Image (cartoon, rainbow, N blue to C red):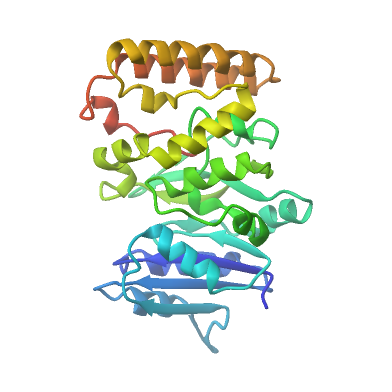
Amino acid sequence: MPKLSVILPARNAATTVEQAVSSTLRALPDDAELVVLDDGSTDTTAAAALRAGETSNGRNSRLKVVSRPASGGIAHALNWLIDNTDSEFIARMDADDISAPWRFRTSLPALQRGDDVVFQQVAFFSGKVLRPQPPLGIPSEVFPLYLLLTNPVSHPTMVATRAALSEVGGYRHVPAEDYDLWIRCAVAGLHLQRQPLWGLAYRVHPAQITASDQWRTASWTNPDQATAYAQLASQVVGVPIERLVSAALLPVDKRAAALERAERYLGRAIAATSQPHRMLLQRKLRTKLNWARQFTTPTDADFSKPMTEGMP
């Protein structure tokens, strides 16, 4: 049984998966495996993944590629991968990103010291343009407060204990399945942190699901996510509050009341944090509130901007 399983679901990713697989194999510790799920692809995704594992001595034994009919969504694919591995630790990887060589040797020690879910910063890239995000860490004591304002991490940088993911029931089939999982982990009292170093090059392209208006609206109005968010808010600020992006969709009068309530309770909690997080969280709260107060429709121009995933 390997100590670490890196799970990589892929569908029609033949043009990018080879680089994702080869970079992750280079970063793997000895006692680890990379499991690629070819999730109903109609192109040569599986062949490209296998090609990335070829060496002068044959195929890399730490690479497993499994082809199956489409599972019905990313959450189902991820849960299948979790259920069909047996390592102590689980890490994520996407089929269009690139792992840094030091990724696992810097993140796994945090799990061994007692953290439950660990992330790293990313450098966004499109074509040949690389945009590293500030290497600012988020310690576990303030991570839940960041979650009430945004998704502060990038999913494919995750490493976690299997026990943590099992405790909260794995992924749910909801929009923003990653953010939903982080919130439920925080509600369960698990320790989440973002390390202050880069671990991944994150590809940005127009076809991403998380870039679509429909996806964002579905996430902002999902009742299961709203319930989890309210539970976390009750723990962190003392009362359930409306998620800011969800409040933006309310009628103007209800929106104003919801945002005023959120500002009051989030502001108090933020004021009790230490620097630099107090300043960063206050800035993020002001930005989110201004956006929500000015928001008009799901075709608002702000939809064309990144939603700060992985930003400080």
Q: Is residue 162 left or right of residue 124?
A: right
Q: Please tell me whether residue 174 is drawn above or below residue 306 in the rendered image.
A: below
Which residue: 65% across, 14% down?
271
Q: Position of residue 70 (x, y in %)?
A: 31, 70
Q: Position of residue 102 (x, y in %)?
A: 63, 57
Which residue: 57% across, 15% down?
265
Q: Is residue 77 left or right of residue 33?
A: left
Which residue: 61% across, 22% down?
237
The quadrant where residue 210 appears: top left
The quadrant where residue 46 appears: bottom left
Most distant residue in the bottom direction = 57
All told, the count of numbered labels is 0
Which image quarter holds the N terminus?
bottom right
Which residue: 33% across, 73% down?
45
The quadrant where residue 137 appears: top right
Most distant residue in the right direction = 113
Q: Position of residue 142 (x, y in %)?
A: 66, 30
Q: Is residue 151 visible?
A: no
Q: Position of residue 114 (x, y in %)?
A: 77, 50
Q: Is residue 115 visible?
A: yes
Q: Please tell me whether residue 139 is drawn above or below residue 119 in the rendered image.
A: above
Q: Please tell me whether residue 139 is drawn above or below residue 265 in the rendered image.
A: below
Which image quarter holds the C terminus?
top right
Q: Please tell me whether residue 74 is drawn above or below residue 177 in the rendered image.
A: below
Q: Is residue 301 left or right of residue 2?
A: left
